[in-house]
């Protein structure tokens, strides 16, 4: 099974995944010290450079890999000056020499890779002894995915159930939490949570339905347009009956949580 390709999202990714400036600033304060002594850094699933380009601006020697040519073209367009080195490649098959990097960054990407263990093995292969895989996973951020689990809005369970009735289910693909990665790595690495960054976002039911019906998030892509529109229509009918306004804002609170999986200083078997 191939990793999820974001070519179809290249045109709207930045507009729908951007972090508030204050949140990005806090995130960089956490990531830069982790990466400063582990350069260069390779970001797998680098996409449009949403994280890699700000890190480069802060002095981190960055490179990127992605299977989406469209996303990489957007990264080049987003770069202020020369772009960082990138390669069109799947994270499970990196055309990179062993021990080439001090760190590997995986930003909400391991859950999109069916063969995520191969991607973790590749990260370990290209890392130097003492390097680290630094990863984030879905579910910790404030941005509610339509019909996604754990949302704290009045319509979350209604939307999830309506979507399921029309066959639209957020099915797991890859590694969705750090325990899976830590368990697979075993003695090869030590898992350490990085400080979390609180995030608060105002969401409306109208925005959430728009995201669902326009299929802005990758978990909706396997389903037909008619399925998501039918689910959206059902929720709109429910909102009308319950007197819920589509433009009423609700605060969704969450956090960005990253993990460092640090390799031993000695090579395997050393």
Image (spheres, rainbow, N blue to C red):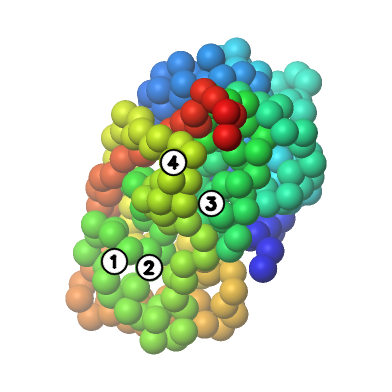
The location of residue 211, given as percent across then percent down, is 48, 61
- Disc 2 and disc 1 in contact, CB within 8 angstroms: yes
> Mark 3 highlights which residue?
110
Quadrant in the rendering for residue 164:
bottom left
Label 1: which residue? 156
Q: Earlier in the sequence, mark 2 or mark 1?
A: 2
Task: Point out the tag, 3 or 4, that comes first from the N-terminus.
Answer: 3
**Is 266 left, or right, of 150 in this rendering?**
right
Task: Count neighbours of disc 1 (C-alpha within 10 A) and say few if under 14, some if 14 to 19, many if 20 or more.
Answer: some
Element under disc 3: helix
| Structural crowding at the residue carrying mark 3, measured as other residues with C-alpha within 10 Å and reported as few (<14), some (14–19) or many (≥20) | many
Q: Find residue 147 and name its label.
A: 2
- Residue in the image at 56% along x and 19% along y: 38
**238 or 263, which is in the foreground?**
263
Q: Residue at left 41%, top 51%?
A: 183
Circles 4, 2 touching at the beta carbon (< 8 Å): no
Q: Earlier in the sequence, mark 4 or mark 2?
A: 2
Decide if residue 123 is in sight here: yes
C-alpha gap between disc 3 and disc 2: 20 Å
Q: Earlier in the sequence, mark 1 or mark 4?
A: 1
Please rate how many residues cluster around mark 4, counting C-alpha atoms within 10 Å: few if below 14, some from 14 to 19, many from 20. few
Question: Against 100, is 225 above or below?
Answer: below
**Foreground disc of the pair 3, 2:** 3
For image coordinates 53% across by 51% down, the residue present is 110
Which label sits on residue 168? none
Question: Which of pointers 3 and 2 lies earlier in the amino acid sequence?
Answer: 3
Mark toward the start of the polypeptide (3 vs 1): 3
Disc 4 target residue: 187
Disc 2: CA contacts within 10 A as few (<14), some (14-19) or many (>=20) = many
Front disc: 3 or 4: 4
**Residue 132 horizontal/vertical position (percent):** 52, 30
């Amino acid at each position: 099974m191939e990793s999820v390709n974001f070519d179809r999202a290249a045109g709207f990714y930045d507009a729908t995944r951007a972090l508030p400036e204050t949140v990005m600033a806090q995130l960089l304060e956490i990531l830069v010290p982790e990466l400063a002594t582990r350069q260069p850094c390779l970001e797998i699933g680098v996409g449009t450079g949403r994280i890699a380009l700000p890190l480069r601006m802060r002095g981190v020697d960055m490179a990127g890999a992605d299977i989406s040519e469209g996303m990489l073209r957007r990264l080049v367009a987003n770069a202020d000056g020369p772009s960082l080195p990138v390669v069109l490649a799947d994270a499970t098959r990196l055309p990179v020499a062993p021990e080439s990097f001090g760190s590997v960054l995986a930003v909400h990407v391991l859950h999109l890779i069916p063969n995520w263990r191969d991607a973790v093995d590749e990260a370990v292969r290209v890392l130097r002894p003492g390097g680290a895989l630094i990863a984030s996973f879905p579910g910790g951020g404030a941005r509610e995915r339509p019909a996604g689990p754990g949302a704290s809005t009045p319509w979350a369970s209604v939307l999830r159930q309506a979507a399921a009735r029309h066959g639209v289910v957020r099915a797991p693909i890859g590694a969705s939490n750090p325990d899976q990665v830590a368990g697979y790595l075993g003695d090869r690495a030590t898992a350490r949570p990085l400080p979390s960054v609180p995030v608060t976002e105002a969401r409306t039911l109208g925005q959430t339905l728009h995201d669902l019906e326009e299929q802005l998030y990758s978990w909706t892509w396997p389903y037909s347009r008619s399925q998501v529109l039918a689910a959206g229509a059902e929720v709109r009918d429910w909102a009308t009956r319950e007197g819920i306004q589509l433009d009423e804002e609700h605060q969704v609170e969450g956090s960005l949580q990253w993990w460092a999986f640090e390799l031993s200083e000695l090579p395997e078997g050393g």
